[in-house]
Amino acid sequence: MSAQDLPIDLRRALVALARTPRLLVASDYDGTVAPIVSDPDKAFPNAESVRALRALAGLPSTAAAVISGRALKDLAALSRLPAEVQLVGSHGSEFDIGFVHAIDSDARQLLRDIVAELEVIAARYEGVHVESKPASAALHVRNADPGDAEQALSLVRGDLARHPGVQVTEGKAVIELAVVPTDKGHALDIIRHQESASAAVFFGDDVTDEKAFASLHGPDVGVKVGDGETAAQYRIGTVEDVAAALAFLLEQRRTWLSGAAACPIERLTMLASPRAKALLTPDGTVTWLCHPEPDSAAVFAHLLGGEPAGHFTIGPSREALPLSQRYIDGTMTVVTRWASLAVIDYLPHDVEPGRTDLTRVITGKARAVVTFAPRPEFGQGQVGLEPVADGLRVLGFNEPYVLRSPGVEWNITTDGAHQTAHAVVDPSDGDIILEFRCGTDDIGPHPVAEVQRRASAEEYWWKWAAGLDLPPLKRDLMKRSALTLRGLVHAPTGSIMAAATTSLPEEIGGVRNWDYRYCWLRDAALTAHALVSVGSLAEADAYLDWVHRVLDTVPGPERLHPLYTLAGGALPPEAVIDTLPGYAGSRPVRVGNAASQQVQLDVFGPIVDLISALAHRREERGVPHDRALTDRDWELVCAMVTAVECRWFEPDHGIWEIRDNPRHHVYSKVMGWLTVDRALTLAENFGRTAGDGWAGLRAEIAEEVMEKGWNEDVCSYTAAYDGTDLDAATLFIGLSGLIDPEDPRFHATVVATEAELRSGSTVYRYLHDDGLPGTEGGFHLCAAWLVEAYLLVGARPQAEALFAQLVDAAGPTGLLSEEYDPVAERSLGNHPQAYSHLGLLRCAQLLAAPAEADRTLSAVDHSA
């Protein structure tokens, strides 16, 4: 029996079930896992079923159980199932071997009386026997003459079955009398609760299994084996069919958890407005959207939990793969096309504070299927949908949500907890416009026509992009990188997100899943610097204003946290959303980030480096020399130097936020040096007064780094003073200008980094044990650093080759995630990642210069 022989509707149901966050697989024993035989002691289980149940129980977020009418002790001995599969005996009354001790003395006496009377009945008829259990007794008549069997059962149904305190359960050729409540449905509910299962499947063949079928609800699946009336939705014929179904479910569950069914991260496309961010899959599903801010709870978390976590899907009524998905050039509007059908997606800009709007326009000649399944607060509350004249209202939350969809007729379905809306639409007579509005109950028409709103949103982006000074190398990709960086800007506050998502894994199935939807001082400064380098200064000004506001909340600049909410506040405690299975089963799903409480002493350098770049760019644009570096910016420079003076000599957690003891990280010391060095350069270039001890401090830091950061045994500068482990960030000892790039020790560090940390097309941050289980991919930013280092040491061919590989890692719409797995050739980590795009831009700028200018360009850029 193969899975292809199973009913197609059952296969579809099992595929959907395999993608539930936490799955419970349960079954009866006799007639399902094992065949019905004349000798009950020889009812050995089907080997394929045993293998499948064992494997299912070993998968993450998956539990398996067998609920049988047999005594638990006998079930354990006969089934040969491993301890990972929970066994429940006596129709749900026995959850452990010592259960008999829970029966009081009256019940035990009643059971003895029942057994005695059943033995009297069994003695009358050949082939009838009694099975005694800890809390019940059963009369089996399978091997008796049919007439004798019915007479024996009739005798039991008489006075004995009506005795007070006795619960009767009849099955195929058996009647069982229990002295405690027995109910397979109740047992199934207990296990469901214990395992926090979001859906369950139950296989059963007997009348006694109907209580389990009756307890199923929502996304659960019941499978009846054999003939007879049943409450189960699906039916199969034999024990072999059960084995095939379990094997099929195992394959589907394992595939989903491994990520094979998940949309590749690099194929996700970001929508952005000045405030809101969303992600699309290549087949037209809105897979990620948060409200009221990008670092708030998700309304659609399909990305981390599949369809049960919320999505908004549009596709052709005749199933087909999309032909393409692309941005409209120079904008953040995305068009997904099928044959004779297209969906245009964008986030409108003309919405008041507190609102998040998403507009989807269906155009073409083919009918489309729309599924609208909002799940606010990561699906933590019950969702109701109310059809109204022009669309839908989302019920059950304090925050209002509406979907304006004039002319669309919706069909509402429920899974028991949430409602979902479905519709089939025909755009041949005119575009279908769907406007999802979060934070308002206004479902009326917008005063501005949709086509004008779309044009306004697109103009915001293309006008900005048209004014950029982009490198000629891979110009279209560089424009998309610049747009992506600006898309991560949170315009209302001036903060800049490190990435648009949380918990996209650094290892498929692993635990290295972090929330990057916040504003890191370092990441944001580097992003703003990249935008300044292509001629856009407004983002840097707004970000520095944000930093000033944050500084007002701390006792001194040396007490800045590494990251803050987009609004500039402290992060809430890091938490886990246990109801979401994570991308490709990668758990936990985290919100918040405990790194906000770490000590990261490198953060001051990128801020001062940004101010330096900004002042020089202002001067290039004709701002008078004495105003190019503003008093407010100089105040911030002085504050950052003060922070370095106070703490540069301390150990810290470093740029990579390692969740282990602090160390004296070389990169952090280099960034302390860079802070003071750029401050001194600014003072000299713009007529400011440097602090008395700044020059001495710069020299002191440089001397210590060059002495303690070098390790002769590995012939390289290392991650920290106290180790031999390498770190790609240590390349900054040359990239920053702390040592001359021609210094043999820098050349040796580049060689060592390439040898130990580069793997094909990517570069790892480090390879030492950081105290966390699992592994991670190579970092695109580290690859960009190595490109720059190659150029500094005169290895231009290596730089060009690595840059080409970095370009190849970009997804079809030009976006880069945080990391790359060179073995599986797939992206990893949060997406899109600011680090990756700013690194890509930097490489293109450097490579666009003539070979002989490599060192000069780098030196000029760093001094600026």
Image: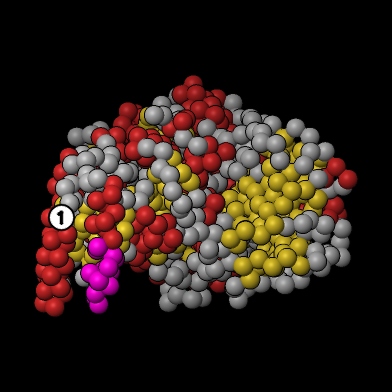
What's under tag 1, amino acid-wise? Arg
For the residue pair 706 and 658, the one nearer the viewer reads as 658
Which segment is the magenta one? 155-168
Q: Is residue 725 left or right of residue 379?
A: left
Q: Which part of the image, by quadrant, shows the N terminus?
A: top left
Q: What residue sits 28% from the left and 39% below the top?
A: 35
Q: What residue sits 46% from the left and 44% below the top?
A: 235
Q: Give residue 264's position: percent from left, percent from top.
A: 52, 38
Q: Is residue 232 left or right of residue 107?
A: right
Q: Give residue 525's position: percent from left, percent from top.
A: 53, 55
From this viewpoint, is residue 125 visible? yes
Q: Specify the quadrant of the image occupied by residue 124.
A: bottom left
> Eyeballing the image, is 856 above or below 75?
above
Q: Is residue 804 left or right of residue 701?
A: right
Q: Which residue is mark 1?
A: 124
Q: Give residue 7's position: percent from left, percent from top.
A: 50, 37
- Residue 160: say if magenta: yes
Asked which colour scheme the image uses, the reply is secondary structure
Q: Specify the quadrant of the image occupied by residue 107.
A: bottom left
Q: Is residue 540 left or right of residue 462?
A: left
For the residue pair 22 and 675, the one nearer the viewer reads as 22
* Label 1 Cα neighbours within 10 Å, binned few <14 / some 14-19 / many ≥20: few
Secondary element type, mark 1: helix
For the residue pair 833 and 171, the one nearer the viewer reads as 171
